[in-house]
Amino acid sequence: MNSAFPVTRFIGRVFLFLLRCAVIILSFALLVTPFNRAGFQEISDGLYSPDTPLMDSQLLDYLLYPWLSIPIGVFILIYAYVRFRFIAPECRWLADLAYLAAISVLMMGIQFAIYFPVIKSNAL
């Protein structure tokens, strides 16, 4: 790594900085998404009737409550503890990439479950 060009090292450090910023933003977004249930409920009521579960999905209706932020927050805290306590500084970039992938998959899954029925619906 010491023989790399200074520009390459600089670009790598900028990339890692942006990666860590993306992790923080996505983690925050994942924590606050369940608190927007009322907005998602309005979309669901427009597509279906107010008596149906959220986006006509029992699982999404069960999961999209503020209590979901508690296990997600615990997961984030456990990752932060493990990252600083047990992962060597040389390997933290790899752990950050893996964490970004996990958070991204969770966020995309929730967004897909919420907005896929909207995409499938007929135009007004």
Image (spheres, rainbow, N blue to C red):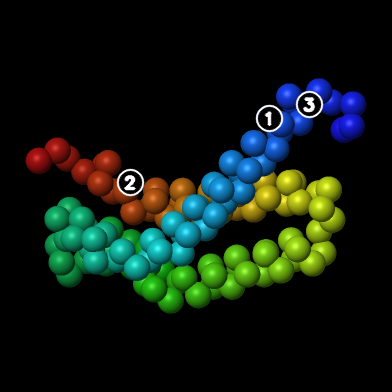
Q: Residue at x 76, y 51 (%)?
A: 92
Closer to the eye: label 1 or 3: 3
x then y, percent, for residue 79: 67, 64
Q: Which of the two marks, 1 or 2, is nearer to us in this view?
A: 1
**Which residue bears the numbered disc 2?**
116
Q: Amino acid at mark 2?
A: Phe
- The residue located at (84%, 56%) in the rendering is 88
Q: Is residue 3 visible?
A: yes
Q: Nearer the viewer, residue 43 or 23?
A: 23
As measured in the structure, the alpha-carbon distance from the residue carrying label 1 to the one carrying label 3 is 9 Å
| For marks 3 and 2 on the same chain, the one whose residue lies earlier in the sequence | 3
Image position, residue 25 (x, y; %): 49, 52
Query: Depth-wise, is mark 3 or mark 2 nearer the camera?
Result: 3
Mark 3–mark 2 contact, CB under 8 Å? Answer: no
With 60 as the anchor, is 52 left or right in this view? left
Q: Secondary structure at mark 2?
A: helix
Label 1 crowd bin: few (<14), some (14–19), many (20+), radius 10 Å: few
Q: Nearer the viewer, residue 92 or 105?
A: 92
Q: Which residue is mark 3?
A: 6
Mark carried by residue 11: 1
| Disc 1 + disc 2, Cβ < 8 Å | no
- Name the image quarter holding the C terminus: top left
Task: Note whether residue 105 is visible.
Answer: no
Which callout, 1 or 2, points at the residue further toward the start of the chain? 1
Quadrant of the image for the N terminus? Answer: top right
Q: Pick whichever, 91 or 118, lies toward us.
A: 91
Above or below 103: residue 79 = below
The three-letter amino acid code for the residue at tag 1 is Ile
Cβ atoms at labels 1 and 3 below 8 Å apart: no
